[in-house]
Amino acid sequence: MASTSGRDAFVEFERVQKSYDGETLVVKDLNLRIPKGEFLTMLGPSGSGKTTCLMMLAGFETATHGDIRLDGRPINHIPPHKRGIGMVFQNYALFPHMTIAENLSFPLEVRGMGKSEREGKIRRALDMVEMGGFEGRRPAQLSGGQQQRVALARALVFEPELVLMDEPLGALDKQLREKMQFEITHLAHNLGITTVYVTHDQTEALTMSDRVAVFNDGRIQQIAPPDELYESPQNSFVAQFIGENNTLEGTVKEIKGGVALVELDDGGVIDAKPVNVERPGERTLVSIRPERVEFNRERLQAGVHTLKAEVLEFIYMGDIFRTRLRVAGCDDFIIKTRNAPDQRRLQPGEQIEIGWLPEDCRALDLPAR
Amino acid sequence: MADTAADMPTDIVGALRTPDGRPLKQALAQAERRARIRALVLVLPLLAFVLLTFIIPIGQMLSRSLLNDTFSANMPALTRWFDENPGAEPDEAAFEALVMDLRAAKEARTQGAVGTRINYEVPGTRSLFTKTARRADRIEPPYREAVLDVDKDWARRDLWAAMRSAAAPVTTNFYQAALDRKITPEGEFAFADKQSRIYITLFVRTFVLALAITGLCLVLGFPVAHLLAVLPMRKASLLLILVLLPFWTSLLVRTTSWMVLLQGQGVINDTLVALGVLGDENRLSLMYNQAGTIIAMTHILLPFMILPLYSVMKTIPPSYARAARSLGATSWTTFRRIYVPQTVPGIGAGAILVFILAVGYYITPALVGGATGTLISNQIAFHMQESLNWSLAAALATMLLAAVLVLYWVYDRIVGIDNMKLG
Ligand SMILES: Nc1ncnc2c1ncn2[C@@H]1O[C@H](COP(=O)(O)OP(=O)(O)O)[C@@H](O)[C@H]1O
Ligand SMILES: [Mg+2]
């Protein structure tokens, strides 16, 4: 994994704050270091300040406080057109009165590049996104996916070292989106450019990124590679925002040898990994992924605590089975099992016992209601 | 198992039919006809209104500019003589017909109208008709000598040429006049006398001033429209009210207030003199000339430029400008190459609106234009109200209409009418 030490950070936010109205902070104390060549995704619900961060980096908004550095240089006072940052917008922002070739030519012309050099670069950029042959068309004559590709080519044609993308795939249908996710990641890695990608779609974030920064309420809640983010969420927001999750409320009884004993509100007791609980008596939210729940007695580790559960519903989903249980007074406890020849299908009304490995069950902060 | 294609009955050639056997095309046409009729009934009142108030008057105007039967209706005998003797010099029979007609005209009191009609062509001849008609009862044969005794002007060749051309109900005389031309008795197409050559100058002045006003409106209106489009909602509404304020004030009041501002002893001159910018003896003449017309009309027509521009600018997302900046363009390049081209539909709509309104404007130039700042419309109004030469007024108006249509066509070729956004 790329080092994130201060010296070789290519993009650096340091204690950045942003307020539009002087009353509320939209971005609160943002610290972020992005090494060269990394694909970093800002993930978070709508209104969490992702676009604002991107706009500050691009130079369209100024930080109310703090420093933003690009390649070691503070850029607070550099106008947007001198930052040399490629950008892809959600609505693509292809100039409607220009052809595709003219759109791509624009950044090269304003850099004073000669005609023959421009033509070569335009052709290569269009070939790169498999849009060769569309030079003479207008943006309105292209499909959404094609416009997306052209927007990408335009952001890359002047060979920026940093590319920003704000929900670029938001307007595409699911299939096209998945294809483009794959292509964008490939392009970014092959060209070795640093990418800051904004999305509110967690699947997109997980599949594309080297690292994901989870935003909520103007703060980065956790910044980690996708696997770590999914398997080791650092707080209850991240756990609930990324992937599907079962949560149960309880109180910490004791913490011993890296395992917390949690007494659930209805009296059941479970083992969990203490993540941000420190001492007995604290209220906690334990979180467990549906695919990590085990109901097969033989496969359960000896000695772990188990809970009684009643099967409420069995849903056949092709590659997996989704079973809804009532556990500790909670009616929407989900378990997912793979559709395999030896897999047992649970029947509604069945009484079972469920358990898990203590490290798969995370005792997190209980968010205030 | 029936598949869906087999459910749909088809005939031998394969045309689709509805389940009750009618060809699909026919059923579709019938269904659409009903909708079309309903739509037609809805627009019928408007159609009738437009026909009554717009198409018919314009048609009337066109026909009036070409048809004028004042002479042929009131001078039937002479008209017949002209018909029977094409190209002939007036003989005794012609003078007899003239006397008969003048007697009848005197009875019907139409000699004045006839005289006025000929007076358009040959100035100063109206009295000839009234005087001779008054004495027509006492004129005895031989008519030629007798009439020439009344006034020897009756021998003028140009007078007889004018009567001959006025006898034809369809005439291009008024268009000739509107073009400052005339057809000489020798049949040549020539310039009219110097003192009556005014219309070409006026047409040119009208179009030049209208262009200047359109240009000024664009230059002044563009920043305002841009401001309207980027300001937050509440401030934009306030500014919009200010832009629309002139619409809620009477045109006459606005023009008069410009007179108060612009006149020699007016607010602007007084201020400049008081500030010492101007000496008291060389006050600017801002009124009763072209400057007055341009200033007052620019102000009056400005909203017609601002509104279409605003409605177009409002729909241009800020992300285009941002994209251009991020691609390396300075704000000036972004404005010139990205923003302005996207406002072209608004510029086009505003420009053509202001231009057409300016070309036809009449009250303001009449009040502040003086001698050098009046436009062709003022001449049209003059012929409608003062000289009562409606045919000439109609010919001038038709030429104005034609010129505007030509410009409209040129505009369509250059900018494209469908590339214009009015609202
Ligand atoms: N130009 C602006 N003026 C005022 N408030 C804004 C502006 N842009 C965004 N905001 C506010 O800032 C917050 C964060 O917005 P944004 O950065 O767009 O979030 P995200 O991209 O994560 O959805 C929102 O509450 C939004 O209403
Ligand atoms: Mg956003």
Image (tube, rainbow, N blue to C red):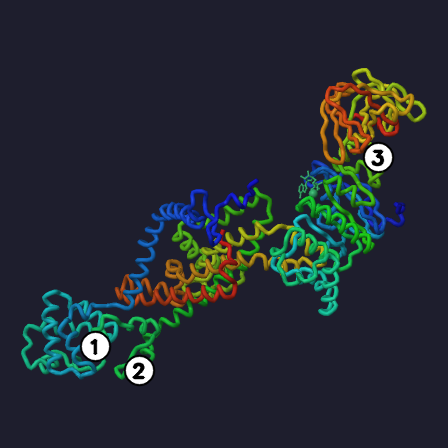
| Sequence order check, earlier mark of 1 and 2 | 1
Q: Say what secondary structure mark 2 lies in.
A: loop
Single out the mark in the foreground, 2 or 3: 3
Extreme right residue here? A257
Tell me the crowding category of disc 2: few under 14, some 14 to 19, or many 20 or more residues within 10 angstroms, Cα based: few
The residue singled out by tag 2 in the image is B188
Q: Position of residue B148 (x, y in %)?
A: 12, 81
- Please report contact status of discs 3 and 1: CB closer than 8 Å, yes or no: no
Give the residue number, with chain letter if any, for mark 1.
B164
Q: Residue at x 82, y 43 (%)?
A: A211
The amino acid pointed to by label 2 is Glu
Same chain shared by disc 1 and disc 2: yes
Residue sticking out furthest to the top: A267
Of the pair B208 and B162, the residue shown nearer to us = B162
Quadrant in the picture for residue B235: top right
Give me the residue at 75% from left, 57% from top.
Answer: A156
Task: Give the amino acid at mark 3.
Answer: Glu
Where is the N terminus of chain B found, in terms of image quarters? top right
Is B220 above or below relative to B135? above
Q: Is label 1's Cβ within 8 Å of ligand 1?
A: no
| Residue A251 position within the rendered picture, expressed as x and y whole percent measured from the top left | 83, 20
Depth check: give the residue in front, A80 or A224.
A224
Q: Around disc 1, counting alpha carbons within 10 Å, would you say few (fewer than 14), some (14 to 19), or many (20 or more)? A: some
Q: CA distance from mark 1 to mark 2?
A: 16 Å
Q: Which residue is mark 3?
A: A231
Given residues B101 and A328, the one toward you in this image is A328
Can see residue A169? yes
Whole-number angstrom distance, CA of label 3 to CA of label 1: 107 Å
**Contact? badges 1 and 2 (CB < 8 Å):** no
Left or right: A190 as drawn, with respect to A51: right
